[in-house]
Image (cartoon, helix red, strand yellow):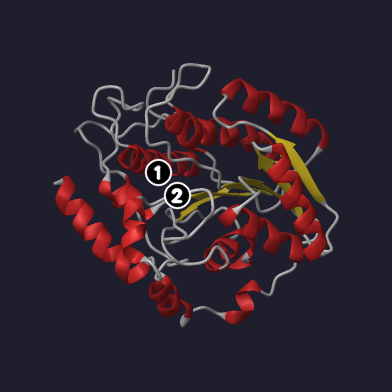
Amino acid sequence: MLLYRSAAWFAKGLREYTKSGYESASKDFVPDDLEVQVPGRAFMVTGGNSGIGKATAMEIAKRGGTVHLVCRDHSRAEGAKAEIIRESGNQNIFLHIVDLSLPKSVWKFVENFKQEHTLNVLINNAGCMVNKRELTEDGLEKNFATNTLGVYVLTTALIPVLEKEHDPRVITVSSGGMLVQKLNTDDPQSERTAFDGTMVYAQNKRQQVVLTERWARAHPAIHFSCMHPGWVDTPGHHPDGPHINLCAGRVCAPRSPPESSIWVRVQSAICGPQVTGPRLGFSEAADWASVSRGRAGEGPEPTDTRPPGVV
C-alpha cells in the first residue's frame, strides 16, 4: 500500500508540484489578489531566515506588515533581518531566537512575546528533516519535536493572543508528502520501526494537517489553513525527499511558492470565521479533510487537539 501511495503521489507531484504545475495553476490566479497592503497587521514567520520563510517575510514586509522572525541561528537570522529591512524599506522587523524543538523554550518565548506584542497571523514555516534518529535534550526525537510538537506548542500558546485581534489566521506550511503516510497514533516518535527520515517527515506533515483540523473546530474565530508550497529548491534541505534529485530543473525557486502562501495570509476573501479545509497545492481550494483523516488503525475520531503521544 505504501508503494502504491508513493507512486501515485510522485506522479501527482510531477504534474502539480513542479515549475510546470505552478505555471499551469498561475493561469487561474487573479493578479490583483496580491495587490494588498497590510500596515498595522503583525505576522510571525518561523524559520524566516532562509528559503520559503525568508521569501514570505520579505513579501509581507514589502506590503507594510510588521514581521516577527522566529529563528534558531542568530547570525543567519540577523543577516536575513538586515536584508529584509534593506530591500523592503520596512523597519518593523523583529527577531526572536527560539529553538522550536525545546517545548519549555517555546512556552517561555510566548510568555514574553505576549507582554510586548500583538499578533494577527502565525506562519508555521520552520521544519527539519533529520535522516538519522537524534534526540533533543528533552529526549524527544528531533523531527517530531520540531515539526509536530514545536508547531503544537507555539500555536496553542499563541491562540489567546490571536483571538484578541481582527481576522486572526494560522497557516502551517505542510507538504504533499503527507499523502504517503496514514496518521500513526501508536508510534509518534518512530521508536518501533526502522528509522527513515523521509517517511518520518511525511508522518510529521500528516500530523500537522490533522492538528490543523482539530484547531479549526476548537477555535472557529481563527482561520486555520495548511498549504503545500510545491517542490522547492531551498538551501536548508529538500523537504519532500530524495526524489527532488530526479526532478532537476523542474523544482520551483523559493520566490514562486510565497505567491500562494502570501495569498492565504493576506487575501481578504478568506477572512472571517468560516474555516476552509487545509490547503495543499498552489492555493487550490480543496477539501482535504478526507485524506487528512487517514489513520493506520480504526476507531472513533479523536477530538483532543494534542498531537499523538503528548500527555
Residue contact at pointers 2 and 1, CB within 8 angstroms: yes
In the figure, 65 relative to 224: above or below? below
Residue 205 bears which disc, if any?
Answer: 1
Front residue (pair 83, 222): 83
Distance from label 2 to label 1 (Cα)? 5 Å
Of the residues shown, which amino acid type is indicated by label 1? Lys
| Of callouts 2 and 1, the N-terminal one | 2
173 to the left or right of 123: left
The answer, for residue 289, to whether it is visible in the render is no
Q: Secondary structure at mark 1?
A: helix
Residue 232 in the image: x percent, y percent?
Answer: 46, 60
* Pointer 1 local density, CA inside 10 Å: few below 14, some 14–19, many at least 20: many
In the figure, 251 relative to 297: above or below? below
Residue 16 in the image: x percent, y percent?
Answer: 35, 69
In the figure, 247 relative to 159: above or below? below
Residue 296 in the image: x percent, y percent?
Answer: 21, 35
Going 38% across and 62% down the picture, which residue do you hit? 286
Residue 60 bears which disc, if any?
Answer: none
Q: Residue 244, located in which quarter of the rendered image?
A: bottom left
165 to the left or right of 229: right
Which residue is disc 2 drawn over? 174
Of the residues shown, which amino acid type is indicated by label 2? Ser
The answer, for residue 279, to whether it is visible in the render is yes
